[in-house]
Image (tube, grey):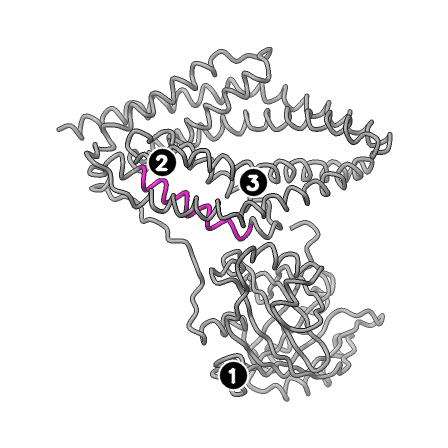
Amino acid sequence: MRGAPQEIEWQLDATDLEGVARWLRDTALSHSLTVTPAGEALMRDRYIDTADRRAWRAGYTMRLRETADDAEATLKGMASSREGIRRRTEWNERLLQASCEALLAAPGAVGRRARALAGRQPLVVLFAIKTFRRRFRLEDCDGRYVGEVALDETSVLADVAAESGVEDIRRVEVEAVDEAAAATLAPLVEEMRLACELGDSQRSKFEAGARAAGLERPSVAVLPPLSNADRRRIGIGALARRVIDEQRAAVLAHEPGTRLGDDPEALHDMRVATRRLRSALRLFRAWLPPEAPPLREQLRWLAGALGEVRDLDVQIERIEAFAEAEPDLEPLAALLRIRRDGARERMLAALDDPRYEALLGALEYLAASATEGDAPALTEAPALLARQWRRFNRLARQLDADSPDEDYHATRVVGKRLRYAVEFVAPLYGKRAGRMRAATTGVQDRLGAHQDAAVAIEQLRALAGDAGGQLPAATLFAMGALAERYAAGMAAEREAFPEVYRRVRLRWRALERRAARGKKRARR
């Protein structure tokens, strides 16, 4: 995650914290480190989230911390320990008071993300813990601050107001300021682990608190794979409902990460799920209830809100990569980031719109609806696939190096529908469908890269026109050179297309034969 602050920390369970404190004072100097007591504090933490656990589902914990003279909020990743050390993203922000209201009004990194996650939902307290902490500052032989050791006596509380805990934890936490400091501290940590008989912590404090509160990690239900018997029996309408259920679950699974905005892949995956849903409603329309067709327009609206941010994410990522070698592009990247902020505001407004909630409810109803006279999927799927293939093949076989950009884009659109159709029926056909899916993905990668470059060139032209006055001349010159690189990339994709098209034709013939055999068996 570009630019995100990182926490680098060892977490070790202890039975005797006094022994660890003595060992630190006696031994650290042998590692050329100076250990200085840095105070002690009683900390009261409340872990918070939305009622549907958006932070947790996105892989983060959100915490309000209060001490005698301070209040702060923390948003922290849930990365697991690897070789005894945790590396995870962490944002902290000082608050006027340790309350959900103060957090949602805070202007900094945690406040912004909390508002994006919560939307119209309130924040609620999941559980609370109380920790007495003793801190020791660590400096190397040059007097450079490299980290600290914290000796924690933690009680997981039965409720927010409780004083006594339902579970007590004694823990040593060693935090390094950066990777170089982690390398410096590693020998000390390993010796301390052996000398003080410390064990790697198997659970974070959040995990301990959640278990004590009877909370389980929220997850979106995943449908089990179809058995051989299921593949023979499932109806085409039932298969359609299964696809809709799976893609609705994907939208829900990626919504928290999309709201946070720190991982572009979450937004990408959510957008793709909306596209698959639109494609499924189109492909299976004959076997879906009359409520289904209007949902395509609702999904188009949602995909548009997501797509505006996604397109800027792609452009920014590329510009930032080029800017490392061509610093004159940095003003362009800064301008695009400002535009992305505006696009994110519009996207979050869409996710908070009752229209979005109504769409999810309608999809849930659709996935649970019954289908009258449901024909076997094995008898109906071959015609669905063949129709998508004919549309794609009619366009793809006409492409050559001189074809207009519009023809490549049109082929990409129908190719995407073919790819989704293959994915939807893949449970019926096993490996043949898997190979065809891989081949169509290869086609889409080529056509997608071509289209992304074409869009990027148009965006650069538009930016040079409507924002040229905001950009230095050197940046405009670099934008022209970048457009030429995009054009060269488009030419390379055109050159590579015939080979990926050849592969997909071969995979189609194999899948077509497999589908025909399945249809014959289903009719027996």
Q: Residue furthest left?
A: 524
| Res 426 → quadrant | top left
Whether residue 114 is in magenta: the answer is no
Residues 454 and 492: in front is 454
Task: Look at mark 3 in the image and give the residue it sits on.
Answer: 306
Residues 524 and 411: in front is 411
Q: Where is residue 369 drawn, in percent x and y? A: 28, 43
- Looking at the image, is mark 2 or mark 1 nearer the viewer? 2
Q: In this picture, is 185 found above or below 60? A: below
Q: Alpha carbon of mark 2 to alpha carbon of mark 3: how far?
A: 21 Å
Q: Disc 1 marks which amino acid?
A: Asp
Task: Look at mark 1 in the image and give the residue it sits on.
Answer: 168
Whether residue 241 is in magenta: the answer is yes
Q: Where is residue 14 drawn, in percent x and y? A: 56, 81
* Element class at badge 1: strand
Q: Residues within 10 Å of mark 1 (few under 14, many from 20)?
A: some
Dots 2 and 3: beta carbons under 8 Å?
no
* Element class at badge 3: helix
Q: Residue at x 69, y 39 (%)?
A: 316
Q: Which of the two labelled residues, at mark 2 and mark 1, occupies the earlier sequence position?
A: 1
In this picture, which residue range is highlighted in magenta? Answer: 240-257
Prevailing secondary structure of the magenta residues: helix
